[in-house]
Structures are given as C-alpha cells and as structure tokens.
Amino acid sequence: LAVGLAAKNLVGNLMSGILIYVRQPFKEGDEVEGGRFRGIVEDIGLMSTQINQLDGVPVTVPNATLLDGSVSNFTDRDFRCIEDRIPVVCDDFRILPTLVDGVQGILEAHNGILQKTEVNALKTKRRSMLKVYAPLCVFDGYADLGAQLLVRAYTRGHINQHSFRKIRGGLLLQINQYLLDS
C-alpha cells in the first residue's frame, strides 16, 4: 500500500513536471504566486520547482501541487492598474473642472502610462476580452476633506513591482505638485 501511494505521488509529480515543460504556464525568472508562496521561479525540475520567495526564503514545491492549485504569473501580464482616489481641498470648488482637466493632461503626457492607442492595440490583441481603458481622471464626489478625484491608468504589465511602484509614486507626486500649484 505504501509503495502504491509513493508511486502515485512520483508519477503525479513527474507527469506534472512534463506538463509544465510543455504548457509553460511559467518559466525560470517569472514571479509567481500560488497557495502559500510568492516568489521568483529559480529552477523547474521534473519532480519539483524551486521558488525563491520575496522574503528570501527558498521553497521547493512539488510539481503536482503547482498544477493542482491556481498559480498566478505576475511576469506574464499585459498591464497593471493604477487606481487612486485623491482628496482635493480648495476654497472654491468651481476650479474642479480645471483641476480634472489638468490631471487628465498629466496622465495623457506620462510615458509610463498606456495611452489610448496602446490600449486599443492591447484590446485587439486579446480580442476585446479585457477591461482596460485609456487614462482617466474624473470628479468622484466628496469625502471628509472636500472633493475627491478618481485617477485610473494602466502601465505596461511586463515591468517588475519595483518599477511599477516608481511609476505610480512618480505619477502621484506629479499630480500632487500640480494640485498644490493650482
């Protein structure tokens, strides 16, 4: 009985390793997440896959476990979403349309943001099966501090988390400076 169960696990992991090689849901160097781990794929073997977690701890995951559950591949994506609500405190709310237009201009001029033509090309590539849109800034109502703007834009998806955060942070700082100057 014990030999039979061990053989089942062995064959399951071996077949899963072969399927990973053939289907390539991820490859070495990709950032993946599944179950209880998130990290960079270091090595894909026939029986198991070595993943370096983001906290530096390496983990060996049986290939059958990878194929039994869902695995998200963060490297293989077309876009990343930036969506923030920005409070606006001002003495005269009649300036809001001007502020919205100014922030919209910042979004449309930013080279790290997917623009309308790139969004349309991406939708064509994916046969319009995406919910991705051109950069947008709109008045989003009122909050505790006053008015609120909604900013939504998309970056290219193949960038790493560090680069994404730099783009997002830089964009928000640029918007902040515009609002302070207005």
Image (spheres, rainbow, N blue to C red):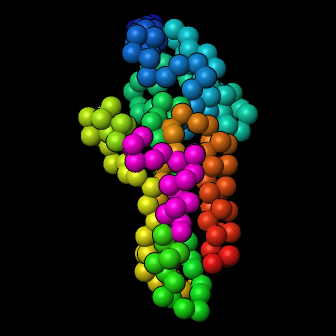
Query: Which residue is depicted at the point 68% across and 76% down?
Result: 181
Magenta part, dominant SS? helix
Is residue 182 placed above or below 65 in the rendered structure? below
Residue numbers of the magenta segment: 102-119
Is residue 37 placed above or below 41 in the rendered structure? below
Q: Pick the residue in front: 42 or 88.
A: 88
Query: Which residue is depicted at the point 57% across and 45% down?
Result: 112
Q: How many marks?
A: 0
Image coords of residue 19 (percent x, y): 40, 13
Q: Quadrant of the N terminus?
A: top left
Is residue 57 placed above or below 83 in the rendered structure? above
Image coords of residue 46 (percent x, y): 51, 8
Image coords of residue 156 (percent x, y): 51, 39
Task: Verify whether residue 106 appears in magenta.
Answer: yes
Task: Verify whether residue 156 appears in magenta.
Answer: no
Farthest bottom residue in view? 91
91 with respect to 132 (left or right): right
